[in-house]
Image: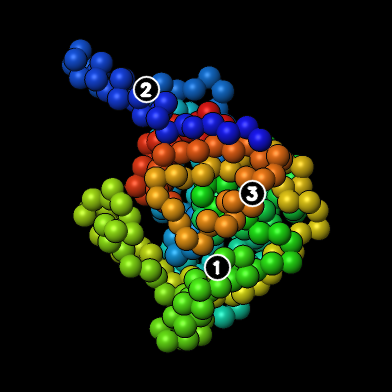
Amino acid sequence: MDRRSFGATTLGLLIGQATAAKATGMSLVRAPTDTPKTFVLVHGAWYGGWCWEKVAQDLRAQGHKVTTPTCPGLGEHAHLLSKDISLTTFITSITNHILYENLNDVILVGSGFGGVVISGVADRIPTQLKSLVYVDAMVLESGMSVFEGQPAAVTKKRLEQVAAQGKGVAIPVPPVNKDSYRGADSITLAWMRMRLAPQPVGTYQEKLVLNNPLGNGVPRTYVDCTASPFEPLVEVKKNLKREKSWNWVELATHHDPMITEPRMLSSFLAQV
């Protein structure tokens, strides 16, 4: 298991570049890459493709191709929310996005809940993929649901919220404040409150079914965001660290780095 710590090195490099640019009166501009890559960035629960805005902009500025699809019932598709949306719906949505956009050699990135989705996509279309990147993401064995994969206390709370606030259809949006998104400024928090949407509960209830080993032969990287623990993933990470099949990377960010530390995340992804 190859463990690396990316955060401190990257921050030092970026700070050094910024200091030099300031001293010379020059702006810090990203140089286009000589080897453009193709990224598909898959959002987590309650989000949509919009959450990747800053990361996508940075990667595109470097010459990479980036798409940020939104799954049904969320983001710009929030009007499609229904009890019929399931984990399979999400997996099919991202699979079709890759196929219909004719994308190949894809670096498929999943954040949080999106880790379950990219596992399902790899099971279906491994030949379209170059690698899988799980950003502080949920990883399930075949035959398990998210509700089964996370701590029982977390699941109990979510189900109570579904019954009391979600009309039996969706998991309500969690609080958005400086405690839940450490490092985010008031503008970012307001931007998020306008866009977060209830998560279709079927995506957490349905079991992930894989017909092949996890990853289906596609190289896998797990990005462990170490700045603060995220309760639903504590045990998941402990179990994954015991496996030698992962490229394990530690990133000094919070659970949602595309929101709180987008520049650090895009800098890492560009090197995958």
- Which image quarter: residue 39? top right
Q: In the rendered structure, which amino acid carries the disc numbered 1?
A: Pro
Say which element carries label 2.
helix
> Who's the residue at 80% across and 53% down the image?
212
Residue 236 x/y as whole percent = 59, 56
- Could you tell me the amino acid type at mark 3? Leu
Secondary structure category for the residue under label 3: helix
Residue 104 to residue 11: above or below: below
Q: First in sequence: mark 1 or mark 2?
A: 2
Q: Horizontal placement of 106 versus 135: left or right? A: right
Q: Which mark is residue 240?
A: 3
Q: The N terminus is located in which quarter?
A: top right
- Report x, y in % for residue 253: 40, 43
Q: Which residue is mark 1?
A: 151
Which residue is under mark 2? 13
Crowding at mark 2 (Cα within 10 Å: few <14, some 14-19, many 20+): few
